[in-house]
Amino acid sequence: MSGSTPEDLPFIESESLESIEGLDTVIIQRLRERLNIETVQDLAQASVEEVEEALSDSDLAVSSETALAWITQARQIVETSEAAAWQTPISFLLEFQSRDVDGQTIEQTYIAVQESREEATFSGLGGEDVQDWMIERYYSISSTASDSEDSGEEPPTDLDKRATAIDEQLAPEESFSETNLSLTLNVIRVSIFQPPGARIPMVVSKGIRSLPRPLVAKDAFDLEIFFELPELAQATLPGKVNYRLEGFAKTIDSAGPILSLGESQPSALKDFEPYYETLLPDISLPSGVYRVQLLISFSGAPIPFALHDFLHFHVVKKSSTVHSRGSSNSGNSSA
């Protein structure tokens, strides 16, 4: 396999091979000499067979289970680094304001976009109207960027660019050889069942980036994902290959933690079959507006993982009252 340097892999922090439990300096040196493995990222792309063979003709020989454990650790480090790399395209100033009028307390919410200085005032404290306004401002930035593209297609996100950069660095020029197969993850349809087993799901098709209605906070839901790996339409797989899909969510203000949406059961890829369906079951989220990211990884062949930033979830509390849209003012209202 071809090695890669930390400079070849932007957006991912380079990790030392010594961070892998069980690897000592002698084994690391042998992997470097035989497989040109220099970083954790290189080890994450190696196969169990390659590692076993590199160490087989010496007293360093290891079992397939040990080799798999090393590779799994490396992939987990890389995947965690990728999932943590979020961008903040827009930020807001939010104020809850109140004043007394004839003995009554009047409350309102003031919100402003820090980058563009757009601002608005809504009656009451918070509510869906405020979140809707924030989401509209977010998408206005996305649509402006899209309009500037000559092709008319949606511009690639930072996640798309990052995954493409990784794939290009890790893959030789030949396509679909036994040592190289680079796949792109395209989400075609998402069905959300809340509660799990609901007869009528909420369905979001390709090209739509937000849900038609909010999810209920802390109520479980299933996420059924129908997706495409277009390169497989003309590819023969190098043996038995399984995939696993994982989901991550983070609030759009980038202040909260990254939340796991769980992972699918390993499933097999098929020759000349680009379409697949998988399930992330029993998910629940607290209230908020989330950016959702999918990561697909592969076992059985050195196929680079792929990322897809595909949806925004609006999650509200059960008792949340839907407020009517307040009037937007061009200036700030004093408290």
Image (cartoon, rainbow, N blue to C red):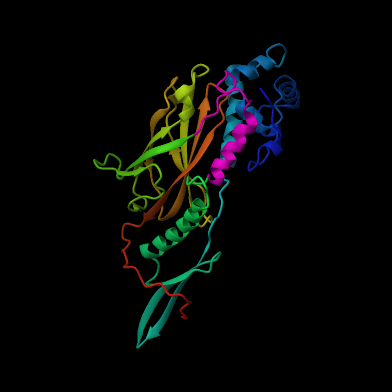
Where in the figure is residue 161, as x and y percent of width and height? 57, 42
Question: Image check: 218 left or right of 257?
Answer: left
Where in the figure is residue 97, as x and y percent of width and height? 44, 76
Quarter of the picture containing the N terminus is: top right
Q: Residue at x 61, y 37 (%)?
A: 165
Residue 252 at least partly seen:
no
Q: Nearer the viewer, residue 312 or 245?
A: 312
Q: How many marks?
A: 0
Residue 175 at least partly seen:
yes
Position of residue 320 relative to residue 193, above or below, is: below
Q: Nearer the viewer, residue 261 or 298?
A: 298
Q: Residue at x 43, y 21 (%)?
A: 270
Image quadrant of residue 14?
top right
Question: Image check: 41 left or right of 323?
Answer: right
Position of residue 216 relative to residue 303, above or below, is: below
Where in the figure is residue 130, as x and y percent of width and height? 40, 65
> From this viewpoint, which residue is outermost toward the left?
199
Magenta extent: 156-184
Residue 232 colored in magenta in the image: no
Image quadrant of residue 267?
top left
Where in the figure is residue 279, as x and y percent of width and height? 38, 35
> From this viewpoint, which residue is outermost toward the bottom?
102
Q: Residue at x 53, y 69 (%)?
A: 117
> From this viewpoint, which residue is outermost toward the top?
57
Position of residue 141 relative to residue 49, above or below, is: below
